[in-house]
Image (cartoon, rainbow, N blue to C red):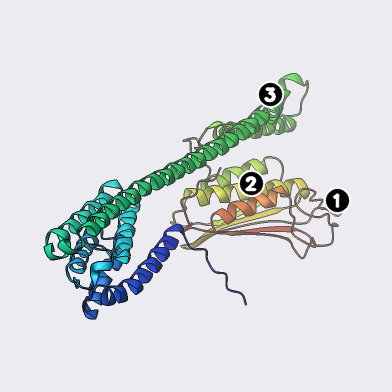
């Protein structure tokens, strides 16, 4: 079994690099300070830890790190043996100088120019103070001390300016990356809006127009056709009413698609209270539909109610399309945990097979469906249920009919608004 090692972030890599540098400087400074400068070993350990630990502490506590560095730097410069230090750099040893440069760079990169300037100016002032407080040492190594002081201060200033330039470049690069990400997101959003507008245009120009023609023809049939039987006229009126309802739904859908941010219309959405009306419209087409509901006083969230309505609408439509004339039974139950909707249609007459071309494989009139369908209708029902954390099971029954069983939890993961 292989364990995948996560790649460290830039901050973690920087902390690791600073830690390694601090340990390396400490390992060199302690013996150098004890042997070359004559500082007691115990004080070399203590002051070396303060001097070399300052860059790491600069990440979170820059002021405390500056104070610790000043105390260590001042003590290390004063606790030297004049006889041993004549041929060594003073008032800075090389590891102490590198620790100061590292502290200046870390403070500048992490906290900005003002905070980075603090250890720079304080370190230079401390070095000058060491020279002032050690006249005996200055008498012996005056020229070397002056040169070391000038070189150290100039080097620290150079590191400070270089760090400012690098951090400024990195910040500009990060800002450019953010701008590119925003531009890419805006471009993607614009493409989505354009695609939705194109879909809305196609729906309006093709589907909505055809539905309007159906509605007008059905509504005017009793006036255009002579001697139209009353039953046929009522049938045409039902077709016209269904077409008008579909046009209303189409207009609402077009409003959603044409809204740039995808905000739905502030109009009432269908819910479980509208299922009886839906069943009445199905009965108006001549279908035999029985309805049983056990809702009680449980409150159904709007998203769950809308999903239940859409699933019932699709299941009833499939039953009418694939098993015309077959009795349909629909049951709705709501408890304190979930909503269960079952739509079952009996097999059609023996003279016609339940050809579910869009949602299931073709089956004979006397044999059950071998598998659940995978068309757009069932896929849409399953997607609606999945968004709410529910399930939809669709399968053939033992007698050759069809059953759609949906379970929708009343407590959804998020506030979901379906359209």
Task: Give the number of the mark in front: 1 or 2.
Answer: 2
Residue 32, position as x, y percentages in the image: 31, 73
| Mark drawn on residue 216 | 3
Residue 382, position as x, y percentages in the image: 64, 54
Residue 408 visible at all: yes
Image quadrant containing the C terminus? top right
Image quadrant containing the N terminus? bottom right
Q: Residue at x 31, y 63 (%)?
A: 99
The residue carrying mark 2 is 313
The numbered mark, 2 or 3, whose residue comes first in the sequence reads 3
The residue carrying mark 1 is 352
Gap between marks 2 and 3 measured at Cα: 23 Å
Tell me the quarter of the picture where residue 246 sits: top right
Residue 250 visible at all: no
Residue 149, position as x, y percentages in the image: 24, 55
| Mark drawn on residue 21 | none
Instruction: Assign a secondary structure to mark 1.
Output: loop
Instruction: Assign a secondary structure to mark 3.
Output: helix
């Amino acid at each position: 079994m292989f364990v995948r090692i996560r790649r460290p972030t830039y901050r973690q890599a920087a902390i690791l690099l600073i830690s390694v540098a601090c340990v390396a400087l400490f390992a060199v400074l302690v013996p150098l300070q004890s042997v070359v400068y004559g500082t007691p070993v115990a004080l070399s350990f203590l002051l070396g830890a303060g001097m070399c630990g300052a860059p790491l502490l600069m990440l979170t506590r820059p002021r405390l790190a500056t104070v610790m560095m000043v105390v260590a730097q001042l003590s290390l410069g004063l606790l030297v043996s004049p006889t041993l230090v004549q041929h060594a750099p003073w008032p800075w040893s090389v590891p102490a100088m590198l620790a100061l440069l590292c502290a200046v760079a870390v403070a500048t990169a992490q906290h900005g120019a003002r905070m980075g300037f603090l250890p720079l100016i304080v370190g230079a002032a401390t070095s000058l103070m060491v020279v002032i407080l050690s006249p005996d040492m200055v008498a012996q190594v005056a020229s070397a001390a002056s040169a070391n002081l000038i070189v150290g201060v100039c080097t620290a200033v150079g590191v400070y300016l270089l760090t400012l330039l690098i951090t400024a470049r990195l910040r500009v690069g990060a800002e450019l990356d953010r701008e590119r990400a925003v531009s890419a997101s805006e471009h993607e959003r614009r493409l989505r809006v354009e695609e939705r507008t194109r879909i809305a245009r196609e729906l309006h120009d093709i589907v909505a127009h055809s539905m309007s023609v159906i509605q007008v023809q059905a509504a005017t049939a009793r006036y255009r056709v002579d001697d139209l039987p009353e039953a046929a006229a009522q049938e045409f009126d039902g077709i016209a009413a269904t077409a008008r309802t579909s046009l209303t739904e189409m207009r609402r859908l077009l409003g959603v698609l044409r809204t740039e941010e995808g905000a739905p219309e502030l109009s009432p959405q269908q819910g479980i209270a509208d299922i009886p009306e839906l069943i009445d419209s199905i009965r108006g087409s001549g279908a035999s539909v029985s309805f049983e509901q056990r809702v009680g006083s449980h409150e159904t969230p709007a998203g769950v109610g809308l999903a239940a309505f859409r699933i019932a609408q699709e299941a009833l439509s499939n039953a009418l399309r694939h098993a015309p004339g077959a009795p349909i039974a629909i049951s709705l139950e709501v408890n304190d945990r979930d909503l269960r909707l079952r739509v079952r249609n009996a097999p059609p007459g023996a003279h016609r097979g339940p050809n579910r071309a869009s949602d299931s494989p073709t089956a004979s009139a006397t044999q059950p469906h071998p598998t659940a369908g995978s068309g757009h209708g069932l896929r849409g029902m399953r997607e609606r249920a999945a968004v709410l954390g529910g399930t939809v099971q669709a399968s053939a029954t033992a007698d050759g009919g069809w059953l759609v069983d949906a379970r929708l939890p009343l407590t959804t993961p998020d506030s979901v608004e379906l359209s």
